[in-house]
């Protein structure tokens, strides 16, 4: 009988067939192998962990896709399909698919798929492209989630915001700015009282606490300083700061944008998920799984949030197989990405810090000298290595979790929501990950050396060469079409909007604080308070910035405020600039671990109750903080 959805035209479009003789032959073969089957209500079409016997097209009815704990992951309707990748590759099904009411399916068996893949290689490329399209919407959701952690796109509260609450909120802001306009003295005419100098910081902190919106808070605080400086002409000054913040840093912004595109293409090509299948064969122990996760982050310190997603997709399932409690695996997979990224000059964080140093008056190469003084990151890396091999004592919540699993309990703590497990588990090739990274590194060195006449590095040009190489590598292997490639580039740029905006706005606010006289006043206060004991400054900077970072719950915002001040203090006290900036960088890392916000992101990705994860890691975070504080005190004394 003629079907409404899964007809000859549908199959021709699905497999991207044309009107050639070869395509007609392929289409006739496929149509001859399709089998129509009817399923009753609540039947399981496939179960997680079972072998794949076929792929399925939905002609009529609806199905539910459920994860390991029975949680609803997705819903499927007529015209959609499922099971294609497991059937083609021979992997196990990753989810349960259950009928909702009477369902009519058209199935294509495994043997037929293998014949197609063997005799018509272009069919395999079609499957990969279709899987790419399915992953795109999920990636956009992940971009929104990642951006929300960086200060943009905060999830909207349920229910409508009343006009009265909006009026009260922004009326109060208007009232504060009006008082600044009317009563604040002109900084160009007279020195401001310390209360006026500190008022933008106070406004920023209070607004963050009340609104929980970091980016909006910094923009309004920046507006506050421009009103102090220019009164009714504040719009022109505000715009001038934004323009000035981008001057001389176009290369940094370009690198941040290109980094987003490269990491997006790695993910969509399936090359990242290939890691799971490579390491799965060689890892025999739980400690080996944690160490493999750590080593992967060492090799790819690109973006901490994307690396956490890699850990969630690739290594957490392996840790579960080895019966590691989720609290333990989450500590390694959640803490190591940021510690490693903040030590890498080619990571998003490294590029961001390099840009902040440059627009704050320092040399771009200064970031390299801060790496050795980032004691927090170094101590975190050492902790992760020792922790992976059971060389760190178990305490508190983590100790109870290990006992729970040993006694046959669940791998995860109570109230853990496991959603979206392994939805992007289609496998590419490891070579598609390794080769572009090699091209990026080699081309950056070659182009930089040719330009400099000696050894040099030009990372922006290296990234562009790598993107061109990836275009031919992925498209000629049919992992994606040219259109999908450039969509990936655009989606990657979208994921970098948040750090770029925070970069520009944060620097503008810091420049405004300097122009009202805050930095000069702070220098004088510091000199007066510490006298000739300048060696205590690195530890003091670390302690204060850690508190600010924990309060802001956004390391990018803290860096934008802290780095210009640290550079000014280093210059006025004739201190080691690398040490001072290293203290700010270390504070950003540990402040982010002390704040609770990231625990929710990590919990959702690594499948663990965020509060349980936070409680498990907190004793170790406190230990690292104390050791780092004394390390900065010692280094300040040594390099005085």
Image: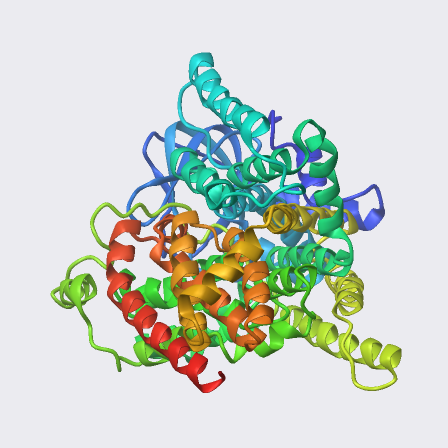
Q: Quadrant of residue 622?
A: bottom left
**Colour scheme used in the picture?**
rainbow
Q: Is any part of residue 202 visible from this angle?
A: yes
- Expressed as whole percent of the image width and height from the top left, the position of residue 223 reads 60, 35
Asked if residue 276 lies left or right of residue 512, the reply is left
Asked if residue 638 lies left or right of residue 126, the reply is left
Tell me what residue is drawn at x 48 percent, y 37 percent. 154
Asked if residue 445 lies left or right of residue 347, the reply is right
State the residue in front, 408 or 95: 408
- Expressed as whole percent of the image width and height from the top left, the position of residue 463 reads 75, 65
Tell me what residue is drawn at x 75 percent, y 49 percent. 244
State the residue in front, 594 or 50: 594
- Expressed as whole percent of the image width and height from the top left, the position of residue 119 reads 70, 61
Residue most extreme to the left: 407
Tell me what residue is drawn at x 54 percent, y 36 percent. 216
Q: Is residue 118 above or below residue 23?
A: below
Q: Is residue 52 above or below residue 566?
A: above
Q: Is residue 14 above or below residue 282?
A: above
- Expressed as whole percent of the image width and height from the top left, the position of residue 303 reads 56, 61
């Amino acid at each position: 009988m003629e079907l409404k959805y899964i007809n000859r035209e549908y199959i021709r479009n699905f497999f991207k067939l044309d009107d050639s003789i070869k395509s007609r032959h392929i289409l006739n073969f496929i149509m001859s192998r399709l089998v129509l089957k009817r399923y009753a209500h609540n039947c399981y079409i496939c179960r997680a962990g079972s072998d794949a016997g076929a792929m399925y097209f939905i002609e009529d009815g609806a199905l539910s896709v459920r994860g390991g704990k029975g949680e609803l992951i997705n819903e499927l309707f007529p015209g959609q399909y499922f099971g294609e990748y497991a059937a083609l590759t021979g992997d196990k099904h990753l989810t349960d698919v259950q009928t909702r009411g009477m369902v009519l399916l058209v199935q294509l068996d495994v043997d037929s798929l293998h014949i197609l893949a063997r005799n018509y290689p272009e069919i395999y490329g079609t499957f990969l492209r279709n899987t790419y399209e399915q992953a795109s919407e999920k990636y956009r959701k992940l971009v929104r989630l990642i951006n929300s952690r960086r200060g943009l796109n905060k999830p909207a509260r349920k229910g409508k915001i009343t006009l009265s609450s909006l009026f009260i909120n922004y009326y109060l802001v208007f009232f504060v700015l009006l008082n600044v306009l009317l009563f604040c003295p002109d900084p160009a005419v007279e020195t401001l009282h310390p209360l006026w100098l500190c008022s933008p910081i106070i406004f920023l902190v209070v607004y963050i606490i009340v609104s929980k919106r970091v980016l909006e808070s910094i923009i309004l605080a920046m507006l506050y300083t421009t009103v102090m400086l220019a009164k009714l002409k504040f719009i022109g000054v505000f715009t001038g700061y934004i323009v000035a913040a981008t001057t001389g840093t176009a290369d940094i912004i370009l690198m941040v944008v290109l980094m987003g595109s490269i990491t997006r293409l790695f993910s969509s090509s399936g090359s990242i998920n290939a890691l799971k299948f490579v390491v799965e064969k060689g890892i025999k122990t739980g400690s080996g799984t944690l160490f493999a996760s750590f080593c992967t982050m060492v090799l790819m310190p690109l973006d901490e949030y994307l690396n956490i997603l890699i850990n969630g997709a690739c290594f957490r399932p392996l840790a579960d197989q080895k019966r590691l409690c989720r609290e333990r695996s989450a500590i390694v997979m959640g803490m190591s990405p940021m510690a490693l990224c903040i030590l890498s000059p080619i990571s998003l964080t490294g590029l961001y810090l390099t840009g902040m140093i440059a627009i704050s008056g320092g040399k771009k190469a200064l970031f390299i000298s801060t790496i050795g003084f980032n004691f927090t990151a170094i101590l975190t890396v050492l902790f992760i290595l020792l922790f992976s091999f059971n060389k760190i004592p178990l305490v508190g919540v983590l100790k109870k979790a290990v006992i729970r699993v040993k006694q046959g309990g669940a791998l995860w703590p109570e109230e853990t929501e496991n959603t979206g497990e392994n939805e992007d588990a289609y496998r590419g090739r490891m070579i598609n990950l390794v080769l572009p990274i090699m091209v990026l590194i080699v081309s950056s060195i070659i182009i930089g050396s040719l330009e400099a006449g000696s050894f040099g590095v030009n990372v922006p040009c290296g990234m562009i060469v790598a993107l061109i190489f990836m275009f031919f590598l992925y498209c000629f292997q049919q992992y994606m079409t040219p259109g999908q490639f450039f969509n990936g580039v655009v989606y990657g740029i979208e994921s970098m909007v948040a750090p770029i905006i925070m970069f520009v706005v944060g620097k503008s606010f810091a420049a405004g604080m300097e122009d009202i006289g805050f930095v000069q006043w702070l220098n004088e206060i510091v000199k007066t308070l510490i006298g000739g004991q300048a060696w205590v400054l690195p530890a003091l900077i670390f302690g204060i910035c850690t508190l600010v970072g924990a309060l802001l719950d956004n390391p990018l915002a803290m860096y934008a405020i802290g780095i210009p001040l640290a550079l000014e203090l280093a210059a006025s006290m004739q201190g080691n600039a690398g040490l001072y900036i290293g203290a700010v960088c270390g504070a950003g890392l540990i402040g982010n671990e002390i704040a609770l916000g990231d625990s929710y992101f990590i919990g959702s990705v690594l499948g663990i109750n965020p509060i349980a994860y936070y409680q498990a890691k907190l004793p170790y975070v406190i230990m690292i903080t104390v050791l780092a504080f004394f390390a900065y005190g010692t280094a300040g004394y040594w390099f005085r």
